[in-house]
Amino acid sequence: MTIVSALADISIFQLLLVALMALFASIIGGLAGYGTGALMPLVLVPLVGAEPVVPIIAISAIFTNSSRALAYIRYADRRRALIVLACAGLTTALGAYGYTRLTNAGAALVIGAMLILSVPLRRVLRRRSVRIGDP
């Protein structure tokens, strides 16, 4: 399958919508520091289905986080970064394996549940004064 054949079913209007949403999500992500991966599925799932959205967002996150890492490398605490990388490597491998076991409907259910649960969970954590990071 080539890129051209993969894009054959997507209209120019849909591609423009994805590009505009990506621009909006990148602005929000740049201002808030997060949110790009939460906003893009809202536009991508109806266009390409739930199953390919996670790899698309993962590739986008690689670009985003690589550029942030390069921009702030001099401020990084290398010891903490190695600890996070070790933990993230294991959990990423487990998550990727779990994702391969999902069907399109299962992927849609997981994405939808996480989007729905993210708002109340954030409010509960804020109410309990839970902070991640240095005080």
Image (cartoon, rainbow, N blue to C red):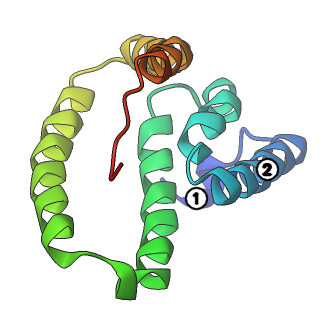
Q: Earlier in the sequence, mark 1 or mark 2?
A: 1
Q: Residue at 56% x, 26% y: name it.
A: 49
Q: Residue at 44% x, 11% y: name it.
A: 109
User: Around disc 2, counting alpha carbons within 10 Å, would you say few (fewer than 14), some (14 to 19), or many (20 or more)?
Assistant: some
Which residue in the rendered view is the most extreme toward the bottom? Answer: 74
- Residue 103's x, y, as percent? 34, 17
Residue 106, compared with residue 111, is above or below; it is above
In this picture, residue 129 sits left or right of residue 12:
left
- Residue 85's x, y, as percent? 17, 61
User: Around disc 1, counting alpha carbons within 10 Å, would you say few (fewer than 14), some (14 to 19), or many (20 or more)?
Assistant: few
Q: Which residue is mark 1?
A: 3
Which residue in the rendered view is the most extreme toward the front? Answer: 135
Q: Nearer the viewer, residue 36 or 10?
A: 36
Q: How many marks?
A: 2
The alpha-carbon separation of the residues under discs 1 and 2 comes to 24 Å
Give the amino acid type for the residue marked by disc 2 in the picture. Phe
Q: Nearer the viewer, residue 14 or 126?
A: 126
In this picture, residue 16 sits left or right of residue 134:
right
In this picture, residue 127 sits left or right of residue 86:
right
- What is the number of the mark on residue 24? 2
